[in-house]
Image (cartoon, rainbow, N blue to C red):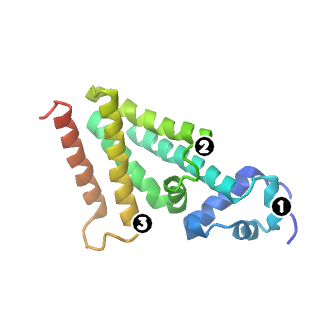
Amino acid sequence: MATRQGLDAETVLQAAIELADQHGIEQLSLAALASKLTIKTPSLYNHIKGLPDLRKQLSKRGLLLVKEAMIEAVIGKAEDEALLAAGVAYVDFARKQPGLYEAISALPDYEDPELKEVGAGVVSFLLRILAPYRLSEEDALHVVRGFRSMVHGFASLEHQNGFRMGLDRDESLRRLLQTYLRGLRWDAGRAT
């Protein structure tokens, strides 16, 4: 294979995202990536430090993009409506970018400073949505953890073909999120 002129780190990352979305993060290899880019595998090292670095970059990009999707979804919304929109956007991201979502779920190094910073940005965003509920910091963090567990669980089950009944999945997700929100209002002393 000939070396491709004009190849840069962003092109490499985009090709890796495509492969991960098509075949899954675990199937992503440097050889497959080089083949997709029509270059020799050693040429990748001009743009990445290896497969662990590539997976880190995929995780980072995934976190940034899922946050961006949630931000877009909540514009003009507040409280329950905002949290509902964020949950739907999260699951929708997992549907549209399954490989990149897997990269988020399988963070290569939870202690990596870059990943911690990006992950903290996602948590911070969700905490801002929760501000009107007037929760203590600890309670708000528990709510964020519960929210992520819920939407991640839904997205993972859906990805693994775990919903085989002929029911509308979007409706199931909406009901799940609304039930969580009712519990949140009750817990925040705002039962209606």
SS class of the residue under badge 2? loop
Residue 80 seen: yes
Name the image quarter holding the C terminus: top left
Horizontal side, residue 131 vs residue 191: left or right = right
SS class of the residue under badge 1? helix
Horizontal side, residue 106 vs residue 33: left or right = left
Residue 48 location in percent, x, y? 75, 53
Question: Which sits earlier in the primary sequence, circle 2 or circle 3?
Answer: 2
SS class of the residue under badge 3? helix
Q: Is residue 132 above or below residue 11?
A: above
Residue 77 seen: no
In which image quadrant can residue 76 be found?
Answer: top left
Q: Residue at x 58, y 49 (%)?
A: 109
Q: Is residue 150 above or below residue 25?
A: above
Q: Residue at x 67, y 67 (%)?
A: 29
Q: Which residue is mark 2?
A: 112
Residue 108 location in percent, x, y? 58, 53
Q: Which residue is mark 1?
A: 43
Q: Residue at x 38, y 32 (%)?
A: 127
Q: Residue at x 51, y 41 (%)?
A: 119
Q: Nearer the viewer, residue 83 or 140?
A: 140
Q: CA distance from mark 2 to mark 3?
A: 27 Å
Residue type beneath disc 3: His
Q: What is the residue that sits farthest to the left in this orientation?
A: 192
Residue type beneath disc 2: Asp
Q: CA distance from mark 1 to mark 3?
A: 33 Å
Q: Are marks 1 and 3 in contact (CB under 8 Å)?
A: no
Name the image quarter holding the N terminus: bottom right
Q: CA distance from mark 2 to mark 1?
A: 26 Å
Q: Which residue is mark 3?
A: 159
